[in-house]
Image: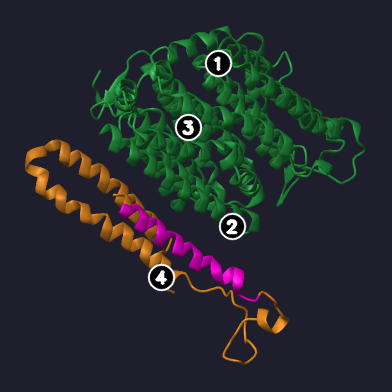
Chain colours: A orange, B green
Amino acid sequence: MIELFLVFLVFGFLGAVLIFMNKFLGPTKTNPAKESPFECGSPYLQEGINPFPIKFYLVAFLFLLFDIEVVFFFPWALVFKEMGTTALVIMFAYMIVIVMGFIYAWKKGAFQWE
Amino acid sequence: MNSFFALFPLLIIVFIALAVLILEVFLKRENRDYLAYISLVFLVICAFVCIQFWNKAYYYFDGNLLLDQFALFFTFILLLSTGFVVLLSMKYISLQDVNYGEFYALLLLAVSGAIIMVSSPDLLVIILGLEVLSISSYALTGLKRKDELSSEAAIKYFLLGSFATAFLLFGLALLYGASHSTGIPTIIRYFNTEADLSLMALIGLGLIVIGFGFKIALVPFHMWTPDVYQGAPTPITAFFSVVPKAACFAIFLRIFYPFWKTAFDSQAIFWLLWGISVLTMVVGNLVALRQTNVKRILAYSSIAHAGYLLVALLAQDNSSLVFYLTVYLFMNMGAFAAVIALSKKDKEYLELEDYSGIGFKYPWIGVTLSIFLLSLAGFPPTGGFLAKFYVFSSAVRQGLVPLVIIGVLASLISVYYYLRIIVHMYMREPSREVDIVVENPALFLVLFLCLYGVLQLGLYPRNILVLINQAVSLL
């Protein structure tokens, strides 16, 4: 047990040392050229932070709503016979929440690409 | 009684949140004030249902949702403060161009999370509720989308908050490993019966304290507070300063009250909380001295108040803790209402300099804000004095004299920065041009209700104390 602990200790310590060694040993002098963004040797053409379309974001959200959440129907179908009406009520409550989200996304124009 | 009725308060809130969300996309922009009225009506209905359920002790889901009197009292507090926030934000939203309809829906979802938290004796369900509360809070913080500070606050809150949740889950995992249960009663029983208490359980409990301490803004975990309070829309700041605090303290009560009584090995946890309490009171009050932004001052003051509340927790005096929270609701909401009153189209007056001469120009706002600040500082005859008096006297009776001395000194320091705002309002020449929109009946309603609450609780707290004693007697 203690050997195992030692192994973890040694390698953990080594990892920490290796991470911070650069910081301590490396030269820290800076100059303006060093601080500027690097773009294959040529002067940089644009700012690093640009606005970008977040449509794919939206796709990811909608994926969460309509794929991941609908996955829960499969286990529900499996236990439906044992649980009976309770399962039905619970799934209807769940469905209402999903449908509400669907209507909201629709009316907000989340499905329009342009 | 095992009954479906136990779900009613939650169902009402969640359904109205969804309905408001849907209505928002169908209503025209100028009609969206109706969303506030709808939310208010259903908050009142939910509060009424809570009053009807008093003494019934309904439970459901095998007792994982338990509406005992404690839960009902806290639910009532949460609903009341949410109602105040809705009233405060009606005018504010259109003045400051905060995103419209999602505001009320997210607010209601957040409070539904808080209600789940206070009405469950199972830590897993509590964390579920905390997540519902937090995720809505992150979104609420960033609702002033054109404001850089607001977005920054939202990101900060989100990153730190999710980190704190990780602590909480890790703590729960350790506790589950030790006691084989996530229910608070079983965990407490484990702490009481196990002769050789495992380190695992103690660390687990410590991590849980850290996780909730983050939401309450106890001192080593308070870094997010001033930035988030400053960046968030002001009604939301008022919401943050009361609702998550009340909910988390309810859970602290549920965990620690039975824990103190019997756990013979609780010294470590006791001294941990003792140290956090001292730090919270001292740091909160000292740092507030240097602030010039009123929202930041109120943020640090709310940190300091969390420290006083911890004193009550350590003194094992439940009723004075709950009383303090109730008074705190009224005085803090009132102070924020006055801060919100000082705003006009696309402009809020938040610097101390802006407050110069306000007291004579807008007498009602000046007088009420002064009373709330005096109450926060703990002057008689306001509720703040009585609350502090109860807390500190019961702490002395428990023999926590050093803690009380530190607490009283800290609250003496706090007098300086509360009075500084009042001095600015009444004794300085106005240095900047301040003109605000005065016609805002909803806001003045909140101001006067809070004023009534502060004075009623300060002068004649008997009725509410009876209720509180009933609520905490079952813990």
Which residue corresponds to mark 3?
A: B248
Name of the residue lying farthest toward the right: B429
Disc 1 residue type? Ser
Amino acid type indicated by mark 2 = Arg
Q: Secondary structure at mark 3?
A: helix
The answer to whether tags 4 and 1 share a subunit is: no
Disc nearer the start of the sequence (3/1) = 3
Q: Quadrant of the C terminus of chain B?
A: top left
Q: Are marks 4 and 2 in contact (CB under 8 Å)?
A: no
Q: CA distance from mark 4 to mark 1?
A: 52 Å
Task: Give me the residue at 46% from left, 27% from top.
Answer: B252
Residue B213: x percent and y percent?
A: 51, 36
Magenta segment includes B44: no
The picture places residue A2, in percent across and down from the top left corner, at 32, 50
Gap in angstroms between the C-alphas marked 4 and 3:
37 Å
Q: Which mark is residue B320?
A: 1
Residue B27 shows in this picture: yes
User: Residues in magenta?
Assistant: A3-27
Give the secondary structure at mark 2: loop
Identify the residue position indicated by label 2 in the image. B145
Residue beneath the point at 47% across and 31% down: B247
Do callouts 2 and 3 point to residues on the same chain? yes
Q: Is residue A8 magenta?
A: yes
| Of labels 1 and 2, the one closer to you | 1
Query: Dot 1: within a 10 Å radius of its alpha carbon, few (fewer than 14), some, or many (20 or more) residues?
Result: many
CA separation in Å, label 4 and label 2: 20 Å
Residue B267 in the image: state x and y as whole percent: 47, 24
Q: To which residue does mark 4 refer?
A: A56
SS state under label 1: helix
Task: Measure the C-alpha gap from mark 1 to mark 2.
Answer: 40 Å
